[in-house]
Image (cartoon, rainbow, N blue to C red):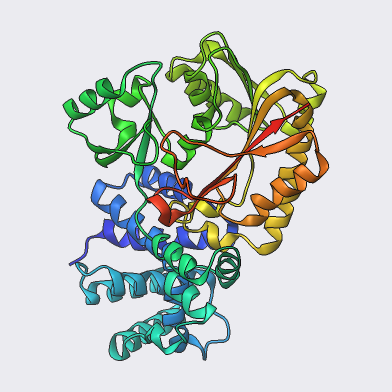
Amino acid sequence: MINKTQKSVRLLATELLTRIEQEGAYSNIVLDQAIKKNGLAKRDANLLTNIVYGVLQHRLTLEYWLEPFVKKEKRIKPWVKQLLLSALYQLQFLDKVPARAILNEAIEVAKNKGHDGIRKFVTGVLHAILREGVRDVEHLSDKSLRRLAVENSVPEWVVAKLIKQTSLAKTAAILRTVNEHPRQAVRINFSKDTKEGLMADLKKEGFEFKESLVSPASLIITKGFAPTSQAYQQGKLIVQDESATLVVESMGIQPQDVVLDACAAPGGKTTHIADKLTSGTVTALDIHQHKVNLIVENARRCGVAEKVTAIKLDARKAAETFAPATFDKILVDAPCSGLGLMRRKPEIRYQKQPQDLLNLQRIQIEILNKVAQLVKPEGVITYSTCSIMDEENNKVIQLFLKEHPEFVSNRTITENKLKSDRDDKTLTIYPDDYGSDGFFIATLKRQY
């Protein structure tokens, strides 16, 4: 018999998935809020997280499976669709949960949240799925966009763009990784500890980890939740993906540099810059005050607050505040689609459309144009995104260089010499390359 708390988990999952699809809510935020608000025990919180992330990761596959069973229904309420998808996910992916229990709870949610007609509809669909089974994606051509999209639950337009900018084989390799569990990486704060010292502290606390092949400043936590560690509370580590760590690593920060972090929140890269400074300073900008507060708090926790000045300011207006040629280095970690983070934020793939890339491109170029005059001659602007789409990456750099002959693109170099055989001067990390997030980094040097 399933207890009442577990039943509420299925209802919560249905409601959260509906909010994410209908309102564009962020999965991590609504999950955290729901777990705290409902006081869920660890087991139930894990189940809720599993269902929500599972449905998001496999949504297009689940919809493909569900379609034959609901095609006669002209209009299904959004929450009923999410209830069916979550039940189907559990039936196909959660082996430890009995099918009968999944059906009973879905029917109970339908009865309590809807009316008798909805209860009968949900009952009929789920019984038909159990009786007939789901159709295999092998019915689709193995070379079709639809097959790749359905198999990996990534929209066809994303698949098409990736094939165009890489190859069919590379795209298939990328797509195979986007539904994997994301790794938990941390960056060592050398302002507070050595690598050896931090590893010893984590071992004492019972954490298990391995060293990163991507960045010497990163560790991969394989057992334990980093933010609960004493090392985190003491500011000895920062939760940051390995690819994100490469950005500041590639900047060639000198101890005395005066640096601008133009799009800084929540401050992970700001504190990394500050970690490399002695007499230098970093000015961190964000357009929202609550995010500026996050930068300040992270700088304080990491013990680098005296090197950081955080200001509420739109980067596109930075030239109105700072004199030309003020900074030795500028980081533009630009607002982007986040499509390099599909593994970490599964809903993002459904919330973006092709036009969004062009809208973001305009903002990205505008920011670069506005901060260009603020870097000193011989200084460097580092441009980065957590996107793997060319419209936000290489095309932005090409457009910027066309308008700014005083800049050249230098080869982006990281400590571990990643992808050293690449033809491009820019560095694109795809999710399948090293198991880290998808990222792009360009190094732009001002000549005069």
Q: For this view, does 223 lie left or right of residue 108?
A: left
- The answer to which quarter of the image holds residue 363 is top right
Q: Nearer the viewer, residue 392 or 409?
A: 409
Using the image, determine if residue 305 lies above or below residue 151. Answer: above
- Residue 8 horizontal/vertical position (percent): 33, 59
Which residue does the image show at 63% across and 21% down from the upper left? 259
Residue at (29% x, 85% y) in the render: 130
Percent x, y of residue 45: 31, 50
Identify whether 352 is placed above or below 155. Answer: above
In this image, 239 relative to 270: left or right? left
Instruction: Give the vertical position of 236 relative to 131 (above or below).
Output: above
Closest to the observer, 422 or 261: 422
Q: How many marks?
A: 0
Whether residue 11 sits left or right of residue 275 in the image: it is left
User: Based on the displayed image, in which of its 4 quarters is residue 203 positioned?
Assistant: top left
Question: Could you tell me residue 385's position as x and y percent?
Answer: 59, 44
Considering the image in quadrants, where does the N terminus appear? bottom left
Instruction: Give percent across and percent down for residue 196.
Output: 25, 23
Q: Residue at x 52, y 91 (%)?
A: 72
Residue projecting furthest to the top = 279
Query: Does residue 191 sit above or below 217 in this rendering?
Result: above
Q: Quadrant of the C terminus?
A: top right
Residue 187: tell me if it is visible: yes
State whether residue 360 appears in this view.
no
Residue at 58 percent across and 56 percent down: it is 24
